[in-house]
Image (cartoon, helix red, strand yellow):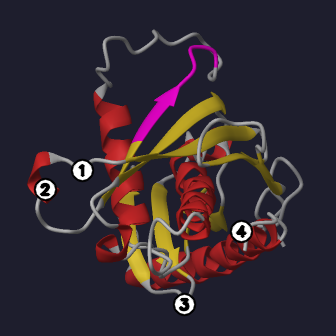
């Protein structure tokens, strides 16, 4: 069996930890660690909606994503004046689309949940970690709304998790770290619900095209990896102390 540079097998996810941040002002806050990648995810509830949702009696879920200047090996410029770079905009739209799949916006009422994903340390998989951690923060915020009787029914209707997969040196593998991602001939991000329903699939052949059979292998690896993330999410939510 192929052994990766960090000792993992091709189908092995990096050590995963999701920690609730009880001292946060946010309605939901967690720190997710996936290997050396660490992302702080906070969910904020606002009693207003964007203009296109006004009068609809339903809410909205959106996201923002950013990296601290030294989250990477070399310092990156701080994003200023609320303007994100192209990569950050693309990722935060992905996170927002993914998390909206977890919520019945009608049950939310005319309020917005903003999920902020701040990368503290990047070593590959920051967008998938943001989705997986962001879901837990969103779930905690929804539970607080229900606990405070601000909503009649739990807005959360599905569990959402994400993982990266790719082909490195002709070997399909799950949860690529930065050295693997930088060498991958195929790079893919998978977002699924708790029943393996596909929410989003982002896949790119970085060099040579990949075959359909390889895609099937990657999907199977990704589904197994997502099962691990789903289990970790449920464990954290069950232990959170919120009904």
Q: Position of residue 46 (x, y in %)?
A: 38, 45
The first of marks 3 and 2 along the sequence is 2
- Measure the alpha-carbon separation of dots 4 and 1: 28 Å
User: Of residues 177 and 172, which is closer to you in this image?
Assistant: 177
Estimate how packed mark 4 is, as few (under 14), some (14 to 19) or many (20 or more) residues with alpha carbons within 10 Å.
many
The span picked out in magenta is 64-70
- Left or right of 135 in this view: 109: left
Tag of residue 54: 2
In this image, 178 relative to 155: left or right? right
Circle nearer the N terminus (4, 1): 1
Q: What element carries label 3?
A: loop
The residue pinned by badge 1 equals: 49
Kindly report which numbered mark, 2 or 4, lies closer to the viewer in this rendering.
2
Task: Tell which of 221 and 136 is nearer to you.
Answer: 136
**Number of other residues with Cα within 10 Å of mark 2, as a class: few under 14, some 14 to 19, many 20 or more:** few
> Residue at 11% of width from left, 62% of height from top?
55
The residue wearing badge 3 is: 195
Rendered image quadrant of residue 152: bottom left
**Which callout, 2 or 1, points at the residue further toward the start of the chain?**
1
Residues at discs 2 and 1 in contact (Cβ within 8 Å): yes
The quarter of the displayed image where residue 240 is located: bottom right
Eye-nearest disc, 4 or 3: 4
Q: How crowded is mark 1: few (under 14 residues within 10 Å), some or many (20 or more)?
A: many
Query: Is 102 placed above or below 62 here?
Result: below
- Disc tally is 4
């Amino acid at each position: 069996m192929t052994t990766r540079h960090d000792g993992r097998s091709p189908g092995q996810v990096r050590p995963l930890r999701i920690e609730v941040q009880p001292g946060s002002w946010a309605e939901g806050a967690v720190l997710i660690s996936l290997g050396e990648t660490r992302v702080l995810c906070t969910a904020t509830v606002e009693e207003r909606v964007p203009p296109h949702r006004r009068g609809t009696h339903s809410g909205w879920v959106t996201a923002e994503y950013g990296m601290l200047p030294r989250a990477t090996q070399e310092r990156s410029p701080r994003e200023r004046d609320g303007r994100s770079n192209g990569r950050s905009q693309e990722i935060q739209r992905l996170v927002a689309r993914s998390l909206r799949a977890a919520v019945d916006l009608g049950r939310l009422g005319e309020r917005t949940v903003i999920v902020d994903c701040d990368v503290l340390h990047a070593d590959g998989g920051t967008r998938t970690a943001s989705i997986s951690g962001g879901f837990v923060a969103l779930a905690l915020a929804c539970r607080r709304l229900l606990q405070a009787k601000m909503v009649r029914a739990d807005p959360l209707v599905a569990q959402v998790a994400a993982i990266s997969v790719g082909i490195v040196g002709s070997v399909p593998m799950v949860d690529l770290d930065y050295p693997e991602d930088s060498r991958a001939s195929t790079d893919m991000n998978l977002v699924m619900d708790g029943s393996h329903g596909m929410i989003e699939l982002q896949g790119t052949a970085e060099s040579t095209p990949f075959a359909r059979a390889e895609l099937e292998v990657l999907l199977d690896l990704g589904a197994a990896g997502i099962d691990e993330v789903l289990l970790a999410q449920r464990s954290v939510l069950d232990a959170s102390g919120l009904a």
